[in-house]
Amino acid sequence: MNPVELSIFTNRMNAVCEEMGAVLQRAAFSPNIRDRLDFSCAVFDAQGELCAQAAHIPVHLGSMAYAMRDIVTQIEWHAGDMVVVNDPFLGGTHLPDVTLIAPVFVNDRLAGYVVNRAHHADIGAHTPGSMPISRTLAEEGIVIPPQFLIRQGQHNSALMQDILKATRNQRIGQGDFAAQISANKTGVRRLEALISRLGLNTYQQALVELNDYGERLARTMLSEIPPGEYCFEDYMDDDGLGHTRLPIRLCLTIRRDKIIADFAGTAAQTEGNINCPLSVAAAAVYYVFRCLMPAQTPACAGTFRLITLQAPSGCLLNAQRPAAVAAGNVETSMRIVDVVMGALGKALPDKMPAASHGSMNNLAMGGRYLDQFWDYYETMGGGMGAGPRYPGLAAVQVHMTNTRNTPIEVLEMNYPLRVREYGLREGSAGSGLHRGGEGLIREVEFLAPATMTLLTERRSLPPWGMREGGAAKPGANWLNGQPLPGKISCEVGTGDVLRVETAGGGGWGQLE
């Protein structure tokens, strides 16, 4: 292929993912998927290697890229199949993220897979929102190993009912699963049409050239990093069960032809749920290096060939079953990004930004209202770290999440909640030559009794600055004016008010 043909091919592949995402968003029942866009779509080749992805959720897509081969190569596939899985220790992230995989056959030959992953606010956990303060995986909801949801076109109704029975709102769950199935069916049709137009041999050769192109761009990025070893450490605030200042240590080795990210010395897996499977750690590492590559770099397996990940079995970043992992996906992944960027800051001091707010600021809640059960989950933005040529943005989602905020109108229309304040948290940003971004304030009044869970970070350890820039102000949580810990589950009553103040972003450079 010449460069123009390769560019057209790349965009056609991306378009398949984007159309899948459009179908999933528009068909979903839950605000979590429909409005917050907490889902991802991708295309893989017949060996389970990443070929394309839409610009959805980095932690979803990076973990799928790392682990999909192990899933698909152990299954005997036929046309019309669709497999469902959410097991974090078999390529998932955490239980609410449910993945559907569909094979694509052309002339009876397996040509690849289309995949989507969506966050279900209710997957049957012990507390509403399915983000509990958990000690084991079993407390976090129903665990789904790879199983056929559809087998050669025939729906496995018994399996679907078993999954839905574990949830509190079966109508919403059924609607969201139907949306995921529809998205994959759309992807299968579009990819079949593309491959049939090109011919399977031409398509496979195009994938080889696509991956080679991704690798060339990765090598160009690597050539700009001075060879050497760069070490950095940062800490998780706590695990929600009394264990504090849990270290994440990285020794990053840069060679001319290879990147080795070694997390030896990281804390052992802990009692709380900030553990994560290795696939989540890989997603965070991939993300940082992808950010250093040109904007046109394709999201394919070749782009990540040069990166090797090492983490001791049983550590916080390579937890073993039955460790609780609900917050590992959303909170620990964000700290891994800070650690990788901190290490690269020693190699590229004039290129790397300061730490951002470092938390997805998770709020899960639910209860009974007007004789119906409701539950909801959302993440909140904060301050972006400043960089060498720019100040940080205020009140934005960063790094491993790419979801929208939930509009006030959507929240109040669907749930017994009233948003009393939503705005910038003035004075939370780190100072410096370039100032960090401000965090945000979100204050919610409960109009009915509910169970509420918070999973937040950067409440005690602030986001750091870069190149002598100032640290940002840590976040804070309040209930009726009384301080709350960063991770807590509690009962709230009618009229109670929750206030979440998220951290700002660190500053970059010393004030002149």
Image: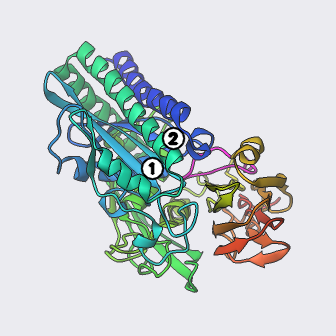
In this picture, is 271 found above or below 68? below
Contact (Cβ within 8 Å) of mark 2 with mark 1: yes
Between 152 and 2, which is closer to the camera in this rendering? 152
Between 308 and 50, which is closer to the camera in this rendering? 50
Residue under the image location 77 percent in, 41 percent down:
409
Cα–Cα span, label 2 and label 1: 8 Å
Residue most extreme to the front: 371
Q: Is residue 135 magenta?
A: no
Badge 1 marks a residue whose secondary structure is helix
Q: Position of residue 49 (x, y in %)?
A: 27, 42
Between 78 and 350, which is closer to the camera in this rendering? 78
Amino acid type assigned to the residue bearing label 2 in the image: His
In this picture, is 65 found above or below 331? above
The part of the chain drawn in magenta is 390-405
The numbered mark at residue 60 is 1
- On the question of residue 352 being in view, the answer is yes
Res 465 → quadrant: bottom right
The numbered mark at residue 56 is 2
The prevailing secondary structure element of the residues shown in magenta is loop
Amino acid type assigned to the residue bearing label 1 in the image: His
